[in-house]
Amino acid sequence: MTEPGVLVLAATPIGQAGDAPPRLAEELAGADVVAAEDTRRLKRLCSDLGITLSGRVVSYFEGNEAARTPTLVEALEAGERVVLCTDAGMPSVSDPGYRLVAAAVERDIRVTAVPGPSAVLTALAVSGLPVDRFCFEGFLPRKAGERARRLAGLAAEERTMVFFEAPHRTEAALAAMAEAFGGDRAAAVCRELTKTHEEVRRGALAELVDWAGEGVRGEVTLVVSGATGGPAEATDPDSLRAAVAAEEEAGLSRKDAIVAVARRTGIPKREVYQEVHRA
């Protein structure tokens, strides 16, 4: 019986080819199959690393990931060494790869990795924000309503949060964060990390919205501080109704008061609404 092969998740540089670990070149050169998100970028990377691929190269990106996974699993079951690499960073982290990893694990095929550059950890490290506890939230939804709901659910998150974002949506994302978390929440926009035009812009969300209004270019990673750990606000029904009433007395409409209390307490807006109108 043929011994199954090995799936290697190969982290690739997020900026400079010189950041590639020596083992990346070894794995690429010795692979039976190299599955690449962009075969043209793979070719440039191999040129920069001074290696020639001996195995076959297949494309593996978001558009064909589902269809191509069974073929790669067959290669693994036939005993081949399959190296998976994406355009930058670690495969399967907001990039193609999760389906293949899950399929390999299900079949007891060994999965290992070439550790290397990560935009998530690099941005977190240079942000100047707390790093003892953090969470990675990937890309926010593109639609404004869905994005607002996602951020509302994170308003009470106390860990530092890391997001990926497209440059042309960075201003809108920062504005939505300022709305959900408050304009004074500390954050950092990390742009073109490790590249020639690397820039880390730190400040309050409201300040960063103004800065992004001038236009943002390049690969963007956003790091946002978590909610401050002050005394937790009471969330029993009487307290929720009292909090909404206080916001209304301060001049907010009932709808806006409910939104404010929901954001502050982390209680879904629907539940706050129901408690207020149940009285």
Image (cartoon, rainbow, N blue to C red):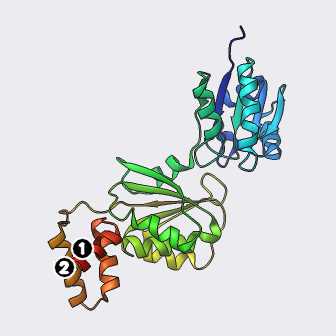
Asked if one can make out residue 1 in the rendered structure from this viewpoint, the answer is yes
What is the x, y in percent for residue 49? 76, 35
Q: Is residue 278 left or right of residue 191?
A: left
Gap in angstroms between the C-alphas marked 2 and 1: 7 Å
What is the x, y in percent for residue 36? 75, 40
User: What residue type is disc 1 on?
Assistant: Glu
Q: Is residue 129 left or right of residue 235?
A: right
What is the x, y in percent for residue 150? 46, 64
Residue at position x 71%, y 26% from top?
27
Residue at position x 60%, y 54% from top?
193
Along the line of sight, which residue is nearer the eye, 262 or 60?
A: 262
Which image quadrant for residue 99? top right
Residue at position x 36%, y 74% from top?
184
Along the line of sight, which residue is nearer the eye, 72 or 139?
A: 72
Question: Crowding near pointer 1: few (<14 within 10 Å), some, many (20+)?
Answer: some
Q: Is residue 195 left or right of residue 277?
A: right
Q: Quadrant of the N terminus?
A: top right
| Secondary structure found at label 1 | helix
Marks 2/1 in contact by CB < 8 Å: the verdict is: yes
| Secondary structure found at label 2 | loop
The residue labelled by disc 1 is 275
The residue labelled by disc 2 is 279
Seen in the picture, residue 83 relative to 132 is either above or below; the reply is above
Q: Is residue 184 left or right of residue 61?
A: left
